[in-house]
Image: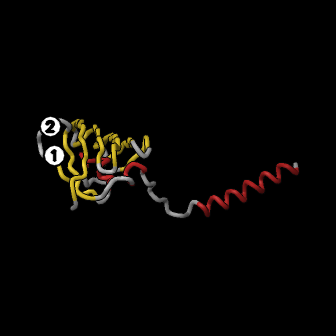
Amino acid sequence: MKGMTLIKTISASTAVFLAFSVSAPAQAPELALLTGLQKGEWTLKTRGSTDSGKKVCLGDPSILLQIQHSGATCSRYIIQDTPSSIRVSYKCGSSDHGVTTIKRESSGLVQIQSQGIKANAPFSFSVEGRRTGSC
């Protein structure tokens, strides 16, 4: 009986501690691959194509995670996060969503693959992202 009282006391103390420790606001985790990328102008280009590609100003590297849904507010689920590779699933509203994989070759060169649904239509693409200057 004495042992049960001790367990109840510890459980009550732990519950009070947890209640105070979780009251701090949650912060988004830093993503290892993205924190190592250089800021500036990046060109996103389909590998092997002759087009000039799409230029983006990379102030916040997380924009690379949802290129097809740029500017949309989306929730993200991190599937894999290492310094050389990241895979993220995201959902924007009730129907738009995607999965993006980024592989880092250097702080100024990445390979991006993404697929999903935008405006009720499927998309799938692979691009190379390369830092091309300042913005």
> Any mark on residue 81, and which?
none
Q: Amino acid at mark 2?
A: Ser
Residue 93: image location, x then y, percent: 31, 48
Residue 107: image location, x then y, percent: 33, 50
Q: Nearer the viewer, residue 5 or 105?
A: 105
Q: Quadrant of the C terminus?
A: bottom left
Name the residue at 29% across, 60% down: 59
Q: Nearer the viewer, residue 61 or 48?
A: 48
Q: Amino acid at mark 1?
A: Gly
Q: Nearer the viewer, residue 25 or 34?
A: 34
Q: Nearer the viewer, residue 13 or 105?
A: 105
**Looking at the image, what colour scheme do you see?**
secondary structure
Name the residue at 88% across, 51% down: 2
Name the residue at 42% across, 51% down: 31
In this picture, is 86 found above or below 39?
A: above
User: What secondary structure is marked by label 1?
Assistant: loop
The number of callouts visible is: 2
Residue denoted by label 1: 53
Task: Please rate how many residues cluster around mark 1, counting C-alpha atoms within 10 Å: few if below 14, some from 14 to 19, many from 20.
Answer: some
Residue denoted by label 2: 49
The reply to whether discs 2 and 1 touch (Cβ–Cβ < 8 Å) is yes
Q: In which quarter of the view is residue 113 placed?
A: top left
User: What secondary structure is marked by label 2?
Assistant: loop
